[in-house]
Amino acid sequence: MDECKDHGLSDEAVHDAFLRAIESDDRARKRFREAEFGDLDLNSFVLDSGDNEPIVFEQATIHGLLNFSRASVRQPLEFSRCTFNTVQATDAEFDYELRFPNATFHGDVDFVGSAFKRGAFFRQSTFDRPLLFGGTEFNAAASFRYATFRAVSTFRDVGFGQASFNEATFETSAQFSAVTFRGRAEFTMTEFASSATFEGVRALAQFDFSPNRVGRSDFSDSSFENIDVAIGVLGGSRRVSLRDTTIETGRLGQPSSDGRVAYDLTGARLGDVTLDLPTPGAFDRYRRYLTDFGNFQFVEYREALRDHRWKIHEYVEPTETTTTDLELTYLKAKRGASSVGDSDDAAHFFVREMRYRRRRYRERTGDPSLPVRDRLGALSRWFTNGFLALVAGYGERPQRVIATAISVVLTSALLYPFEWVGGVRTADGVYLYGNRPTLAAELAAFAYDNSLYFSVVTFTTLGYGDSSPAGGLARLLASAEAVSDAFFAALFVFALGRRVTR
């Protein structure tokens, strides 16, 4: 379109000449090679020449404003190796493909509220000023591959079909807020010089995030059907926030080189997600705090769990925790492990849960702001919790019940012969410490004839056999020992059954 090169024409005249050219049946007139424009204002215009011939700009320059606001573009458009100042395309509709290969944008670019019914391609384009897509809909593919963003790039409340930002470079922050990716989204070999924010994202298909470089990555309050994260780190540490995010399947990777990536999964929900562990010690690179577990396979990390003593909340970065939240963390982990039939890990998480519950009772006991009644109730529960931990490992350690029962028998046997307790009455008289001529005879009488024998019989039967307690305290001790037998028997059956059923 030669008349566009005539700088003597006004913008209105150039605009009219442009419209005449695109309405022409001559295909060649719809190609604008090395054309120059001041402003090209197509505000609220219906761009339709009645055919599907693409309108092509090659190495064209628009020095002023390219305005597609509220326009309806019903032709394929291509701006190849073109240079722009400001682009305003709010609430525009593009029925066919829109292409900007190797384009340069020196001014602001605004596509707020626009809709792309076919593909939109910005391959190898450069954006010198802020870029804004807000409320924009890409029904098909959107490609920013090899693009360079030199100012803040904002994609807010945008809907993508397929999206590719492979090998793009963001020289400042990139913001993808409340974005929906309906198809595959790719950020492979992307360069983020600063932070990358993906808050409130919904990814309904594969989401690949494998940048060569990135500062802090924020995926909080998002949901991913399938995510693959593999961040390149050359030494040092990178942080990825996945707080309150749902991940159905995927992989959270670690760099193959030196360095680490720390994932904050606070409040997240993990399904069948793989956590890369270069070594079992790398387990603390993933913070599982108040995290829900759906189809997460703890059994695949048994060695790492064992090395960390099933402390899944420990994190390589500085964090703050509360006892109440730690208790809830292990309750959620226990439920998650149980839901996939992993009874062994569920048992360990249950023990952790009960320990933090005991700590919570202790804190309430010492809290001066609480009423005395509440503090006494907390003290009672703290004691009960500690007692169950000691004698049965919260029902997860049946061997502790046996050990405790044996200790009751031995302790009682040691107490009976004291004179202040009363001793053990036998056919030969009352057995007390010191009434045998030698130490060997004393031990034999204790072990076989008197106290130990009496303690075992008292613990295991309802009667005293051929011996009986002598004195009030001895009778009280014998009664307590006899009652404890029933308690420990029931506790052992409970703990053993719990272990077997797990």
Image (cartoon, grey):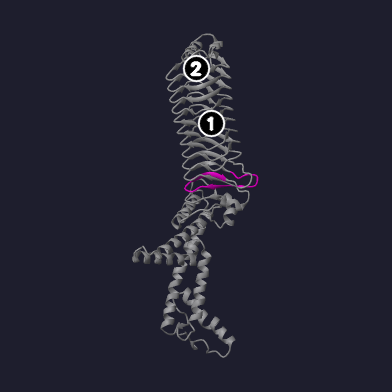
Q: Are the residues at dot 1 and dot 2 in contact (C-beta closer than 8 Å)? A: no
**x%, y% of residue 463?**
44, 77
Q: Disc 1 on helix, strand or loop? A: strand
> In the image as oriented, which residue stretches furthest toward the bottom?
437
**x%, y% of residue 67?**
46, 22
Q: CA distance from mark 1 to mark 2?
A: 22 Å
Please tell me whether mark 1 or mark 2 is closer to you in this view. 2
**x%, y% of residue 371?**
34, 64
Q: Quadrant of residue 369?
A: bottom left
Q: Give the amino acid at mark 2.
A: Gln
347 vs 83, nearest the viewer:
83
Q: Is residue 422 above or below residue 494?
A: below
Residue 9 badge: none
Task: Answer few, some or many: residues within 10 Å of disc 2's Cα (few below 14, many 20 plus, some between 14 and 19).
Answer: many
Give the mark nearest the N terminus, 1 or 2. 2
Q: Residue at label 2?
A: 75
Q: Residue at x 48, y 31 (%)?
A: 132
Q: Which residues are magenta?
A: 253-274
Task: Answer few, some or many: residues within 10 Å of disc 1's Cα (few below 14, many 20 plus, some between 14 and 19).
Answer: many
Which corner quadrant holds the N terminus?
top right
Q: Give the amino acid at mark 1.
A: Ala
Q: Is residue 211 magenta?
A: no
**x%, y% of residue 2?**
56, 11
346 vs 454, nearest the viewer:
346
Q: Disc 2 on helix, strand or loop? A: loop
Q: Quadrant of residue 91?
A: top left
Q: Residue at label 1?
A: 163
Side of 72 where 106 appears, left or right: right
Q: Is residue 334 above or below residue 442?
A: above
